Amino acid sequence: MRAIIGMAAAAVLMTAQAAHAGTPPWRKLTSFFVLPSSPHQNDVVRVLLHCPDEANHAIVGSTAFMLKGSWRTYREVGLGLSERGFARDGVIISRYAPPGHHEVRMKCVKVTIDQHTHLRKVKVLSRASVPLFVREFRVRQYF
């Protein structure tokens, strides 16, 4: 009788270890938030994201992030990921960004560099996008 109980306990422990050996499903998901969703020009937005475990870098870009004096209308910002795949950063909405609707796009990538040739390979693992509404700059927002 004790042998049967011991064998059953061992079987339960082996299946529990096998279940924990795989990665949880939330670690393979991509999520992306930009807060607030309707900032003014010259404001800072908070970018919160999660990438799959294989990714080691994230790229966030939009036409709302353009720099003063730059002829490029689309600007990309790179974010390093933590070991669990999370990243957060503040990005400035330019005062010169046109008011209205913009789209913020995010790519989770895996970057590998060959040590001998120093060539870089970038593999896109997932993508996401979020709408952003930029409001006109007003001095009274600071008072």
Image (tube, grey):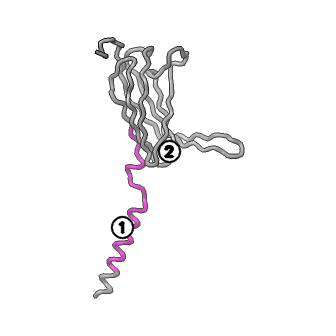
In reply to whether residue 17 is colored magenta, the answer given is yes
In the displayed structure, 137 sits above or below 16; it is above
**Callout 2 environment at 10 Å: few (<14), some (14 to 19), or many (20+)?**
many
Chain part drawn in magenta: 7-31
Q: What residue is pinned by disc 1?
A: 16
Mark sitting earlier along the chain (2/1): 1
Residue 72 placement, left or right of 48: right
> What's the CA distance linking mark 2 and mark 1?
28 Å
Looking at the rendered image, the quarter that the N terminus falls into is: bottom left
Tag 2 residue? 55
Q: Amino acid at mark 1?
A: Ala
Q: Is residue 18 above or below residue 36?
A: below
Q: What residue is shown at x 63% (from left), y 43% (from top)?
A: 113
Of residues 1 and 91, which is closer to you in this image?
91
* Between 42 and 124, the one nearer to me in the picture: 42
- The image quarter containing residue 22 is bottom left
Pointer 1: residues within 10 angstroms few (<14), some, or many (20+)? Answer: few
Q: Residue furthest top?
A: 139
The one nearer the camera, 139 or 4, is: 139
Where's the C terminus, which quadrant?
top left
Position of residue 121 measured from the top left corner of the image (x, y, whole percent): 61, 41
**Residue 85 on the magenta segment:** no
